[in-house]
Amino acid sequence: MTSPRLAGSRREVMHLAWPIGVSMMSFTLKGFVDMAMVGHLGTDALGAVGFASIATWFALCFPWGILRGQRPLVSQYIGAQQKDLAFSFGAHAFYLAFLSGLFLIIFQGALVNIFGHFAADTALTPEAIAIGKDYYAVRLWWLMPTLLTFAIAEYLRSTGRTRMPMAVDLLAHPLNLLFNYLLIFGHWGLPALGARGAAIGTGLADLIGLAVIAWLARPRTKLPIGALRVNLSKLKEVVAVGWTGGIQFSLENLSFLSITWIVGHTNQAALAVHQAGIQLIHLSLLPAVAIGDAGSVLIGRYVGEMNWDGVKRTLRSILQIMIPFMGMMSLVFFFFGRPLSGIFLHDDDPVVLNMALDLGQGVMIAAAIWQLGDAIQIAFRFALRAAGDHHWVMWTGILCTWLLSIPLAWWVVFGFTLDPNSVEAGVHGSVDKVWLVWSGEIFVGSLIFIWRWRSGAWMRHRLVKDDAVKVLT
């Protein structure tokens, strides 16, 4: 058992967090590269691919949330000294990843059609919509290796082996850059495929990453008899914990897609600015998530041990690391928002470009405002979920999103209409104002999570079952 004196220290959190942080930053760089390279094709291509990227992430949300259901199970059973059972949960998460990828392949055509109808009701041109549909169709075909890689990486991080996924990310993302360079613009004798080339390049990089992480994570010791055998009760248990995350991620990202759809009613440049802002907030969001991820591994382990002091100390350490970092990023966004937006925004018309850069600066000021609330929300959300209080986290996230974010965004864009029968007359709100009111959800959610943690109710949601070892024999 880990020494209570050291359990949950800042050093212990950072020992696990920095490899996750490197992975997250490499993921951010991957998004930067994709959007920056596609941005050179014009604001129409950037808006279309950005919209399709959100749709791709939405398609991943439910299986992604299900697969994260192994996190508290694996970490808590390791804390309870039942490592074979922890491995079994990881194996069953891998099986669920395969089934999820297969589902997306089978229903690829239907999903692309839905995307097309959704995109048609925005300011995107028909040409831009065609670009987005083509990109989205290719991405769906290649999501199987993405999900399988995530399942393995999530298991490794849940056991504290965060450097293996980091090594794979450091390999896969430069490959993504290379493949994009070759396939978007057509080099080394390859055809210039434009946005479609970006989708293929990402898929190829993910496939190579899957092969590498599967080799690195191969078992080195003899496994118990039932560890790899498909067991319906194990699948159900992973789903039982993960479905709350899947529902929450799906509905939250549906709201995010809805906000993008609302922004799309203003103008095409605003949609490009919105996508640029999404990429830029990853500079603060993903490192913060890395810290929360690392802390959730420790919290799950200490809940398994029933080391409650270690759990509370871990959360304090997460906040002590995260709040200063997010505060620093707030200053960066506030003072350098315009040049940062310029990394992504390109247009031949200087008037359109200048308008987009002005909007980008406003979006970054809004992002600067919500940094402190985001730090608190991420820390407490990850802590509560790791402790097993996942139902509360789900409902809080869903209600805050759908009762605050969507109505506020709609009100900003359409709320000032003089003629309720004319949509165009009502589009007076801008993307920077949408982002500003968006911060309301961030701060309300953070206050609710603080209250829940202080109540101590999460202590009653430990997931470890004393007789669970019987399923492996």
Image (cartoon, rainbow, N blue to C red):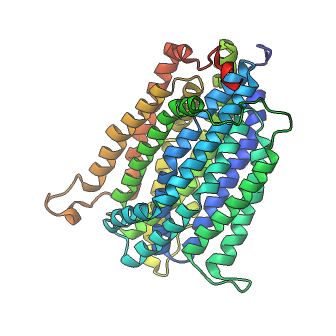
What residue do we see at 57% from left, 28% from top?
Answer: 233
Q: Is residue 257 visible?
A: yes
The quarter of the rendered structure image containing the N terminus is: top right
Q: Nearer the viewer, residue 10 or 60?
A: 60
Total labels drawn: 0
Q: Quadrant of residue 469?
A: top right
Looking at the image, residue 49 sits to the left or right of residue 412; the answer is right
Give residue 430's position: percent from left, percent from top: 35, 58
What residue do we see at 56% from left, 14% from top?
Answer: 459
Q: Nearer the viewer, residue 433 or 231?
A: 231
Query: Compared to 448, does 261 lie above or below?
Result: below
Q: Quadrant of residue 31?
A: bottom right
Give residue 126's position: percent from left, percent from top: 37, 77
The quarter of the rendered structure image containing the C terminus is: top right
Give residue 137's position: percent from left, percent from top: 50, 67
Q: Quadrant of residue 4?
A: top right
Q: Nearer the viewer, residue 122 or 117?
A: 117
What residue do we see at 37% from left, 53% from top?
Answer: 259
Give residue 323's position: percent from left, percent from top: 61, 34
Q: Is residue 361 visible?
A: no
Query: Compared to 218, does 13 lie above or below?
Result: above
Q: Residue furthest bottom?
A: 189
What residue do we see at 58% from left, 22% from top?
Answer: 387
